Image: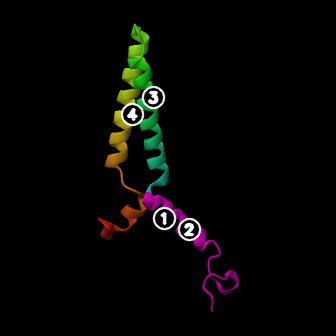
Amino acid sequence: MDSKNPKDGGNRFQILIELAEAVDAWRVFPRIFIGTYIYLLYRVVMWYMGLDDPTVEQSSMVSIISGVGAAWFNSYVASRSKSSKRHPEND
């Protein structure tokens, strides 16, 4: 009896469920977001350092971007994936 056959009482979406759990365990999307943030922060800092006479507004923007990003990165590092919370033996 094939357990993935819906006619036999199996779950036809089991492969998708396993894929979703793998993506959750690997934390793909948070890693993409952190990588994107690092790239954007780099670009903003390079832009700011290239300015001849930065204004207060430009300085504030760079400060806010770096501060918010640091808080977001701290939140990412302190969090765990949902699958590792379900399976305490992964710690």
Q: Name the residue under label 3.
A: 43
Badge 3 vs badge 2, beta-carbon distance below 8 Å: no
Say which quarter of the image contains residue 83: bottom left
Identify the residue at image location x=37%, y=63%: 84
The circle drawn on residue 17 is 2
Range covered by the magenta-colored residues: 1-26
| Amino acid type of the residue tagged 4 in the rendering | Gly
Q: In this view, does 54 lie above or below 61?
A: above
Label 1 SS: helix
In the picture provided, is 50 more to the left or to the right than 10? left
Q: Mark 4 or mark 3: which is in front?
A: 3
Q: Which of marks 3 and 2 is nearer the N terminus?
A: 2
In percent of width and height, residue 78 lies at 31, 48
Say which quadrant the C terminus sits in: bottom left
Label 3 SS: helix
Identify the residue at image location x=31%, y=70%: 89
In percent of width and height, residue 14 lies at 59, 73
Q: Earlier in the sequence, mark 2 or mark 1?
A: 2
In the picture provided, is 16 more to the left or to the right than 51? right
Q: Earlier in the sequence, mark 1 or mark 3?
A: 1
> What is the CA distance from the residue labelled 1 to the residue labelled 3?
32 Å
| Amino acid type of the residue tagged 3 in the rendering | Arg
> What is the CA distance from the residue labelled 4 to the residue labelled 3?
14 Å
Q: Mark 3 or mark 2: which is in front?
A: 3
> What is the CA distance from the residue labelled 4 to the residue labelled 2?
32 Å
Q: In this view, does 65 lie above or below 3?
A: above
The circle drawn on residue 22 is 1
Q: Which of marks 1 and 4 is nearer the N terminus?
A: 1
- The kind of secondary structure the magenta stretch mainly shows is helix
